[in-house]
Image (tube, rainbow, N blue to C red):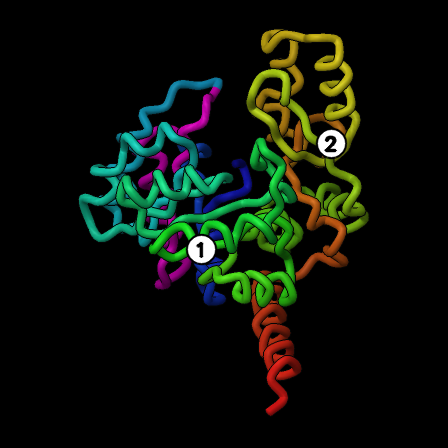
Amino acid sequence: MWLGVAELAAAVSNTGGLGFIASGNFPSPGELRAEIRKVRSLTDKPFGVNVSVAPTFRPTDRGALIDTAVQEGAAAIETAGRDALQYAERIKKGQTKWIHKCARVRDALTAERSGADIVTIVGYECGGAPPPNEITTFILVPLVVDAVKIPVLAGGGIGDARGFIAALALGAEGVVMGTRFIATRECMAHPNVKEAIVKARETDTTLVQRSIGTMERVLRNKTAETVLDMEKRGASLEELRQFIMGERAKKSWMEGEVDLGILACGQVMGLIREVLSVQELISSMVKGAVAIHQRLSPH
């Protein structure tokens, strides 16, 4: 959210990944259509659209957004959450692939039965919404690979060639990265935020919003600490809303007030040493993966 826009998505796709724009940034079909066409003006490679079905503070016709993405020829639509399953037929009307992101084995099985083409499984390390049962990526990926017949992508704690190769070794067909792409030159995040991520350790995240059932792993900043204290005191959603609202996070991301909002980031921050271009990042991962493969298979 806020950062998944045309420039970053096109940069990822141009380098051989599959870049995504977040439809939550463009809540009307017209705005989303314009952004999709902007991506297409920046790349001739495939790209996708994320359509969030999580509770939101502003009303959105998600079905219309999905229809728009399909009509405009997005290569993939990414969803998450059980509520997304109701849109299965609308997603699969065209040639668009459906990638469903989940955090439990049973949810991956449900997505497969519902017609998902690909399932992403994210472990407890991930930024944003981790699995409520606190199972890590290294355990979840092989469990899901064994459980489903469709391709599996791995997310959570992956930010370099080592994580990429590890995911492939666990049976995944590819990886999903969020936090690592924030610390790239093409990302719109303010330099202050990127600097905070580079300086952060793996211990500099925390889990907020457990008490209201929307747990998120975020950067441990002043606002996150305030929210944690409020939750310990039994604060209601209405009391928490002023601190967790999206517009406040947007201001942090865009204006560099790192302590102002809730910033979803994963434990992989501890592995991020510098801000790279998307080209440098993906190229280093591919070259590193080849080197690891050669080391493991010397003959």
Q: Is residue 36 magenta?
A: yes
Query: Left or right: 111 with respect to 218?
Result: left
Circle 1 sits on which residue?
145
Q: Is residue 255 magenta?
A: no
User: Disc 2 or disc 1, which is closer to the eye?
Assistant: 1
Q: Give the residues in magenta.
A: 27-56
Q: Which of the two labelled residues, at mark 2 and mark 1, occupies the earlier sequence position?
A: 1
Instruction: Say which amino acid is labelled 2.
Output: Glu
Q: Is residue 50 visible?
A: no
Q: Position of residue 70 (x, y in %)?
A: 25, 44
Q: Going 73% across and 55% down the picture, which residue do you hit?
A: 272
- Which one is nearer the viewer's eye here, 195 or 30? 195
Q: Position of residue 154 (x, y in %)?
A: 52, 53
Label 1, secondary structure: give it: helix
Label 2, secondary structure: give it: loop
Label 2 and label 1: CA atoms lie apart by 40 Å
Residue 50 sits in which quadrant?
A: top left
Circle 2 sits on which residue?
257
Q: Going 78% across and 24% down the picture, which residue do you hit?
A: 225
Q: Position of residue 112 (x, y in %)?
A: 32, 45
